[in-house]
Image (cartoon, grey):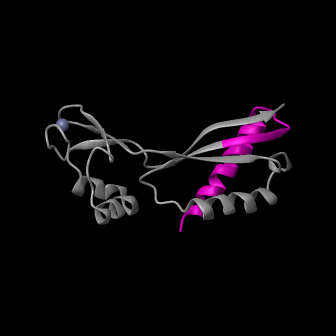
Amino acid sequence: MHEWALAESVIKTAVEHAARGKLRSVSEVAVFLGELQSIDKEIFAFALAELVKSSFKGLSGCKFRLLAEPAAFKCKACSKEFTLKVLKKTEEEAENIHFIPEMAHTFLKCPRCKSPDFDITAGRGVSIKFIKGEA
Ligand SMILES: [Zn+2]
């Protein structure tokens, strides 16, 4: 799984942010986990906790807040915005979409005009929402 690689990039970003902002310590990092990104939250949290130990000392007391970012789509044909929730999906389809975001185009259609041509506007990646610390 990719949890460890993702955790590593979150830590790296937090360390760089601390260095740029001349922070002595980082107290909190909020991370958005996209709904379409199949991440095992427990493994991810464990990876963060482990990686922090061998990282910049200022990160040692840091709390990682893991927040879910729901997937969102925008139709290219009629500009309708929609989410996975408004579309009734079978579990198998939902599972496929989670594993391969690109598959969304095979399973989903715009609820208004039925176009399969849409952009994924949210929920496909991992991003840092904010980093708090002390200078
Ligand atoms: Zn549409």
Residue most extreme to the left: 113
Q: Is residue 54 visible?
A: no
Residue 120 left/right relative to 54: left
Quadrant of residue 107 within the rendered picture: bottom left
* Residue 106 is covered by the magenta coloring: no
Ligand 1 sits in quadrant: top left
Q: Could you tell me which quadrant the C terminus lies in?
A: top right
Quadrant of residue 90 within the rendered picture: bottom left
Image point (33%, 47%), residue name: 84
Q: Magenta segment range?
A: 1-29
Image point (36%, 61%), residue name: 100
Q: Is residue 65 above or below residue 99?
A: above
* Residue 10 is covered by the magenta coloring: yes
Residue 59 at what x, y percent from top left?
80, 48
Residue 120 left/right relative to 127: left
Residue 42 at what x, y percent from top left?
61, 62
Q: Is residue 119 above or below residue 6?
A: above
Image point (64%, 50%), residue name: 10
Residue 58 left/right relative to 7: right
Residue 76 at what x, y percent from top left?
22, 36
Say which of 58 and 72 sits in front: 72
